[in-house]
Amino acid sequence: MKKIILSINTILVSFLLVTSSWAAVHEKTLENGLKVIVKEDHRAPVATAQVWYKVGSASEYGGITGVSHVLEHMMFKGTPKYPVGEFSEILASIGARDNAFTSRDFTAYYQLFDVSKLKTSFELESDRMAQLNLDESEFIKELEVVKEERRLRTEDNPNALTYEQFNATAYNSSPYHNPVIGWMNDLDNMKVTDLRDWYQQWYTPNNATLVVVGDVNSEQVFALAEKYYGALPSRDVKQLKARLEPKQVGERRVEIKAVAKLPYMIIGYKVPSLKTVEDTREAYALSILSGILDGGRSSRLSKNLVREQEVAASAGAGYDLYSARSNMFLFDGTPNAENTLEELEQAIYQEIEKLQNELVSERELKRVKAQTVASEVYQQDSVQRQAYIIGSLETVELGWQTMNEYADNIQKITAEDVRAVAKKYLVNDTKTVAILTPLERKSFGAKQ
Amino acid sequence: MIKTTMLIRSAILFFVLSISSTVYALPEINAWTTDNGIKVLHVNSPELPMVDIALTFDAGSARDNELAGLSAMMHGLLDKGTGKLDADDVASRFEDVGAQFSASVDLDRSSVMLRSLSNEEFFNDALTMFISVVSKPSFPERDFDREKKRLLISLEDIDQRPSDIVGRKFFELLYQQHPYAQPRSGTKQSANKITLKDIKKFHKSYLVTTNSILAIVGDVSEQQAQDIANKISESLPKGKAQEKIALVKSSLETKQHIDFPSQQSHVRMGQIGVERGNPDYFNLYVGNHILGGGGFTSRLVKEVRSKRGLSYSVYSYFLPYEQAGPFMLGLQTRSDQVTEAIQVCNQVLADFIENGPTQEELALSKQNIMNGFPLRIDSNRDILGYLSLIGYYNLPLTYLDDFNKNIENVSLEDVKKAFRKQLDLDTFVTVVVGSEQKPEEDA
C-alpha cells in the first residue's frame, strides 16, 4: 500500500501533462483593449462564450451597494437594436442556455450553445456591451425582483444573515465589507441614474475579457470577435482607490439573533490571496491547508470533529485562492444536539493548534495533492467550468496561465510550508467570530 | 412587438435549414446483461483519463414503507465501514487516489456512484473499494447512532427553511397515502423509529442485481467495461424483483397555509401529472416549456417576474416517475403580494389549459429544445445520467437518437389536447408557507 501511495504523485503529474497538452489556450487582445481567450475542446459540438467585466461589489462604495448586481439584471432588459425580451427570445431560438453572475470581484455573462451558433452569441453580447437601454420603468420592476432575491437568499436564511454580518464585522475599509447583493436600504434608494453611471464607468471592451471554450477554431473565434467586438469604442477606466484593510489587532466577535432552529458559527482569519501574497508559496500552502481540513470525507474536520469527537453535526473550512483582495481563511459549523457552539469553537481551535505544532502526515499531504490533480482532470468534463477558471483568473489579473501552474505549485508544497502558514496566519489577533443564536417563535413551523 | 414576431419568423426559417443539415454525433451505447442479471449500458469516451460509474437500484424512498428516510439513511451509511475498514479507512482509500464516492436517492431509484481517474492502478483501488462498500457494508453501530443524530439535525435545518417546508407539505397533500407522499430524508418521527436492523434488512433486500442498472462512461473499452460489470455483478445477490409501486390516485383540491415567520411566502401548487413513458410526455414537455419551463421566454416568468416584478424565481414542470409524478408550479414573493402572485399564476394556467400556446410560442420552444440538444449530452456526467434513466425506465436505447424527432412531431393540437386532458385546476393542491402579516420593514 505504502508503495502505491508514494508513486501516486509522479504518475498523476505525468498524466496531467498528457491531458493539458491537447487543450492549448490562445489569446489575443483587440485594438480597443478587449482581451479574447480561446480554449479549444473538441469533445462535443458545443461551446461556451463568456464576457467577464472587471467590476463587482468590491468596486462599490457606500450608498450604492448592490449596483453591480442590479446592472447585471438590467443587462437582459434591451438595447435599441434588440428591445426588451428579444435577447432572451433569440437565444432561446438557437437553443442556448444563458445566464449571468456577479461576485465581489467580477460580473460575468455567459451563453452555452451548439457551436454553430457562436455568431449569434457574439452579436447579442457585443451589442449590450455598449448599447444598453436602461429604461426607467423596466428598472423599477427589476429592482423589485432583486429585492425578492435578497429576501430569498438573505433575509429569510439565518446562515446567510450570519455570513453577511460576519463580513461586515471582519472587514472595515475593504469593500468585502458589503454584501454582493447590496444592503436592502441601498436597494430601496437605488435610482436608474446610478446604473447608467455604473454602466458608463465599467462596461467598456478594455475592462472586459471574452472567454470561449469548446469545439471552435481559435483563429476563427478571433476573426469573429474582431467583427463583432472590434468596432466598440474604448473608454478610460477610472482607477479605484486602494481601500486596503487596516491591520486587525484583536479578536472581533458578533452575535446574530434570528428566527432559526439551529445554532451556527463562522470563524475567519485574515489571509492574503494569491494575488496579494508576497511569497506565492504561502497561498498554495493555505490552499493545501484547506484540503487537509476539508477536502472530502477523510479530511480532518470530518474525521475528527464529526466522526471521532462527534462535536459537530457539520463542519467546514475554505480558502479562496483567487480573490482579487486579501480575504479570510474560513471555518464554519453547526454543533451536535448535545454540544454547544462554545464546544465546537474549542474543537476547531484544537485542530488549528495541532496544525501549528505538528507537521501534517505525508499521507495527508499526498492525498490532497492527488485530489488536486484528479480534480484538474474532472473539471475538464465541463466547458463551463474551464471557462469560469480562465475568466476569473483573467479578471483578477492573475492570468489564465496560473491555471496551468496550479498543480505544479501545489506539488511543491511541503508539510513544513503548511505548518508555517498555520502558525503565521491562524492567529487570534486577526480572527473574527460570528455566532447565530436561534430565536424561537411560537408559530415557528408548527401551527397551520 | 411586430418586430419581435418578424425576427422569430426569420429565425424559424433559418432553423429549419440548420436542423435538417445538422447531424449530431451521438454517443454509441453498448448494452448487455451480466450473467448475474445486471443490465449494463456503456459509452466509451476516451478523451479524458477518467471513468464515471453509476449503479442504480429499485430502492428509492417509495420502498421506505412506514420508515420514511430508511433508504436515504442506508445509502448514507454504505461508506462508513466494510470488512475490517472503518469510515476513516474507506474515505482514505477513495481519496488517496483522487476518487469520489457518492450516493443519491429519489422516489423510485437509488444510485451509488464512483468517479475516478482511469489509470489502471488508481481505478482498480477505487473500484475494489466501491464494490466492497456497496456489497459488504459493515454498518457499525456507532456510525449508525451518529448518522441518525446528524439526520435529526438536518431535519431541524429543513424546518427552518420555508422552501423545504412547502415542498414537503405539497407532496404530502398531493399523494396522501401513496408512498410518494413521504419525504426522502424522512421525518423526525420516522427517523427515530429506524433501527440498525432495518438498515441491514433494507440493504439485503434492495441492493440486488435484479432490476439494477449499471452505467459506465469514460476512458474504458467495452472489454474493460465487461470486466468491471462482472466484478460488480458477482459481488451482489440476485435477489428478487420488487412489487410494482402502487398506482396513484388523482389529487383533490386542497389549499393549505402554514404560518412561518419569514418575509417571503413560498408557494407550491400543482396536481398529479404523468408517469415515465406516458404517450403524452413529449406533448406535455414542450407545452410546459412554453408555460413555465423555458426560463425568460415562458409565460409564467413573463407575467410574474418580467411584467410585475413579483418573484425572483417562478417555474413549472412535470416530473414523471414510475407511477404518475407531480405537475408543479413554484414561486416565492413578499408575503403581502402572495395573493396577487397566485392569482396571476391561476390566470396563466387557466388560459393555457383553455387556449393552449400560440403557433409562434410552439415554434420557439421547439427550436429551443431541438437546437439545445447537444448541450444535453456534452459531458460524461450528462451521458451517465441518460444511461441510468434509459436503463431504469426501460426507455428505448434510441431515446437520444429519437429525442429531436419526438419534439419536432409535437403539434399545437397535441399540446392543447394533452394539457386539457392532464390538468384541471379543480383538482389543484396549493400550499403557501409564510407570514400572514406584512413584512416588518413595511410595518
Image (tube, rainbow, N blue to C red):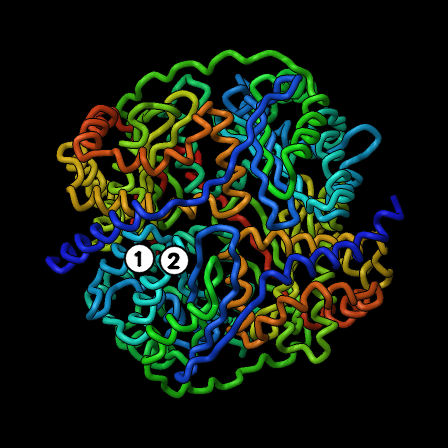
Residue sitting at 37 percent across and 31 percent down?
B170
Is residue B128 something one can see in this rendering? yes
In-image side of A362 versus A132 (left or right): right
For badge 1, the amino acid type reads: Val
Q: Secondary structure at mark 1?
A: helix
Q: Position of residue A270 (x, y in %)?
A: 65, 71
Q: Which residue is mark 2?
A: A99
Disc 1 crowd rating (10 Å Cα; few below 14, some 14-19, many 20+) is many
Q: Secondary structure at mark 2?
A: strand
Considering only vertical position in the picture, is B42 above or below B298? Answer: above
Q: Which residue is mark 1?
A: A145
Q: Quadrant of residue A398?
A: bottom right
Disc 2 crowd rating (10 Å Cα; few below 14, some 14-19, many 20+) is some
Residue sitting at 35 percent across and 58 percent down?
A117
Asked if the residue under mark 2 is in contact with the one under mark 1, i.e. CB atoms within 8 Å, the reply is: no
Q: Chain of mark 1?
A: A
Residue sitting at 40 percent across and 33 percent down?
A447
Q: Earlier in the sequence, mark 1 or mark 2?
A: 2
Most extreme residue toward the front, as rendered?
A: B21
Total number of numbered labels? 2
Question: From mark 1 to mark 2, how far is it between C-alphas?
Answer: 16 Å
Q: Chain of mark 2?
A: A
**On-image quarter of the N terminus of chain A:** top right
Q: Position of residue B142 (x, y in %)?
A: 76, 31
Considering only vertical position in the picture, is B338 above or below A88? Answer: above
Residue sitting at 49 percent across and 70 percent down?
A37
Q: Position of residue A411 (x, y in %)?
A: 77, 63
